[in-house]
């Protein structure tokens, strides 16, 4: 029994001997509330367990922590020590007692730190750290743009930095960053400074006095230690500084503004671009109109859709608008791009109405109106356009022959030969026109002589393949050859004529196909319904006797 008591006593004595002694130290005391400092925990032996530093979070922000061990041999005796290094930032001012930190059963003694208030801007300048917060104007219209600049300046080399967030208490704002942080050099007095600058565009959503809270900036100073023999080199000190508070007055919507959409901007303009040649428009063929709305001092999301109005005789298929924000040091330029496909249903003159958009000029303080003037476009009927194209190819050749004939008769002195040459040229011209008409009639006869069923079969097969592949563009291209191959006795030159001639359900399916090609939604197109309507027409023409042209309803070109 006594042996067991002696053994227990020896174990307790041994534990008392090897109990780790942990000391606490600081790199400087006192410290400022806006400056980081380092707190050290040194253990001369391995402690009972890992440390629990959570009690420190009540008074400090733990920025970083590290641990390193060292072994020394003195007179043949091995000694191991462990060191924990914490980088802390005080949360409050006062005499703070670092609470007991437990390392398992081992623990530290309380440690007192004196935390002083943050230095004012003059003192910050003396220490070489300045933080400025400024605005490009003292007042701004509601939903208008105000540019905020944060500028952090240090006269000491730094290895890292961080800007706090812009916080506005009493007004909802939309905050947009204007690019990355810029770095450059400047001088204040006789001292050089590194400048870190970042800009933001703020858009207040309601009127009143907008107050931006002080923003905190932090930098990590370059380490003064450059020893390559210290693998656990201490990181540089972290310092912070607060900017002053910034107040901006936000004005409401001006009573003089009478439009529906409030658009406060320094500049706003409208322009249009046409993809096709406006002098060669043909009925049934789509033309693309692009309208650009560009506003300086507004985001693209603030720009409203433009009402282009209904145009009688023209089908419109608007595409989904493209929004883009162009950012620079001067702010945001919002761009709204709207494309619309126009398909004239027949030849004639069409008037496109004026597009107007009122806006508020924040420079002059007046309401202005951006406009796209009205314009009239001339659309050729499909058959007239084909005939004009043929004449355009034949007439220049005839003119060239006339000029050649005149050049040949210039050396002749006799008027007889001049008049004879002109007579022959006119005869040649009449023969060319007669030949063209006979050639056209011959082509038509040759076309009629071809097996109608073979042409229809080939055109129907192409249309069927495009519909089964759900390819709207190929189906649109295949419809006119298919319609030309139908034995209906009428020449169909565009899809509008085709839709009017056969009516429903083909008309609805053609509109659905055009909507898929030129509309805003651009939903996947299913060609089964169009093929079903076309197949039904083919079957009807096969089961019907030859259709007399006089019995057909009139087609409007």
Image (spheres, helix red, strand yellow):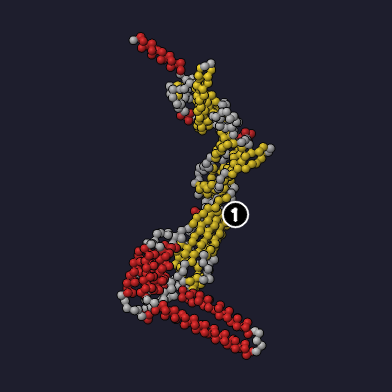
- Residue 181 found in image quarter: top right
| Position above or below: 280 against 405 | above
Q: Position of residue 420 (x, y in %)?
A: 60, 88
Q: Position of residue 459 (x, y in %)?
A: 39, 70
Crowding near the residue tagged with mark 1, few <14, some 14–19, many ≥20 C-alpha atoms within 10 Å: few
Question: Residue, x 63% and y 82% (percent of image)?
Answer: 407
Question: Residue, x 35% and y 69% (percent of image)?
Answer: 534
Which residue, as the protein is rendered here, is positioned at the far right?
190
**Quadrant where the image shows the C terminus:** bottom left
Q: Position of residue 237 (x, y in %)?
A: 57, 32
**Quadrant where the image shows the N terminus:** top left
Q: Disc 1 marks which residue?
A: 363
Q: Position of residue 183 (x, y in %)?
A: 60, 42
Residue placed most toward the observer, 328 or 140: 328
- Residue 249 seen in the figure: no
| Position above or below: 514 against 75 | below
Element assignment for label 1: loop
Question: Residue, x 37% and y 76% (percent of image)?
Answer: 451
Question: Residue, x 50% and y 28% (percent of image)?
Answer: 67
Which residue, as the protein is rendered here, is positioned at the far left?
543
| Position above or below: 227 against 258 | above
| Position above or below: 398 against 173 | below
Residue placed most toward the observer, 263 or 130: 130
Q: Is residue 103 left or right of residue 191?
A: left
Q: Is residue 503 left or right of residue 41?
A: left
Which residue, as the protein is rendered here, is positioned at the far bottom?
416
């Amino acid at each position: 029994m006594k042996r067991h008591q002696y053994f227990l006593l020896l174990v307790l004595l041994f534990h008392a001997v090897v109990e780790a002694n942990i000391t606490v130290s600081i790199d400087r005391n006192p410290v400022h509330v806006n400056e980081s400092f380092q707190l050290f925990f040194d253990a001369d032996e391995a402690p009972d367990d890992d440390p629990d530093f959570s009690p420190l979070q009540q008074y400090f922000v733990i920025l970083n922590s590290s641990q390193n061990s060292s072994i020394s041999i003195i007179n043949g005796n091995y000694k191991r020590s462990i060191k924990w290094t914490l980088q802390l930032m005080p949360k409050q001012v006062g005499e703070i007692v670092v609470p007991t930190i437990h390392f398992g059963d081992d623990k530290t003694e309380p440690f007192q730190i004196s935390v002083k208030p943050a230095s004012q801007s003059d003192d910050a300048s003396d220490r070489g750290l300045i933080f400025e917060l400024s605005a490009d104007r003292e007042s701004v219209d509601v939903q208008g743009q105000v540019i905020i600049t944060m500028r952090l300046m240090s006269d000491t080399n730094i290895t890292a930095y961080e800007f706090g967030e812009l916080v506005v208490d009493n007004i909802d704002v939309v905050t947009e960053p204007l690019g990355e942080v810029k770095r450059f050099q400047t001088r204040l007095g006789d001292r050089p400074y590194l400048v870190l600058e970042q800009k933001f565009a703020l858009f207040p959503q309601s009127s009143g006095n907008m107050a931006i809270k002080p923003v905190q900036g932090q930098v990590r100073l370059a380490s003064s230690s450059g020893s390559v023999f210290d693998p656990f080199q201490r990181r540089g000190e972290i310092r912070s500084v607060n900017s002053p508070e910034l107040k901006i007055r936000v004005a409401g919507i001006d009573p003089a503004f009478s439009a529906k959409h409030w658009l406060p901007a320094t500049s706003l303009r409208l322009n249009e671009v046409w993809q096709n040649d406006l002098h060669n428009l043909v009925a049934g063929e789509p033309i693309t109109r692009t309208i650009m709305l560009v506003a300086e001092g507004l985001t693209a999301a603030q720009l409203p859709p433009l009402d282009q109005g209904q145009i009688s005789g023209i089908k419109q298929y608007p595409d989904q608008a493209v929004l883009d924000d162009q950012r620079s040091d001067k702010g945001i330029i919002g761009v709204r791009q709207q494309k619309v496909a126009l398909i004239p249903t027949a030849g004639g003159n069409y008037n496109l109405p004026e597009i107007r958009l009122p806006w508020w000029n924040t420079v002059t303080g007046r309401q202005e109106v951006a406009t796209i003037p009205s314009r009239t476009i001339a659309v050729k009927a499909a058959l007239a356009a084909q005939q004009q194209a043929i004449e355009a190819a034949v007439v220049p050749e005839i003119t060239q022959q006339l000029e050649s004939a005149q050049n040949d008769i210039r050396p002749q002195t006799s008027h007889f030969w001049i008049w004879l040459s002109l007579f022959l040229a006119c005869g040649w011209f009449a023969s060319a026109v007669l030949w063209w008409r006979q050639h056209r009639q011959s082509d038509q006869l040759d076309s009629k002589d071809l097996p109608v069923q073979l042409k229809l079969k080939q055109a129907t097969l192409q249309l069927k393949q495009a519909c089964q592949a759900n390819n709207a563009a190929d189906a649109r291209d295949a419809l006119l050859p298919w319609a030309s191959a139908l034995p209906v006795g009428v020449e169909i030159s565009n899809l509008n004529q085709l839709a009017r001639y056969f009516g429903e359900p083909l008309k609805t399916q053609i509109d659905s196909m055009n909507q898929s090609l030129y509309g805003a939604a651009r939903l996947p197109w299913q060609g089964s319904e169009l093929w079903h309507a076309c197949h039904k027409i083919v079957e009807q023409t096969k089961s019907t006797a030859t259709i007399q042209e006089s019995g057909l309803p009139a087609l409007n070109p």
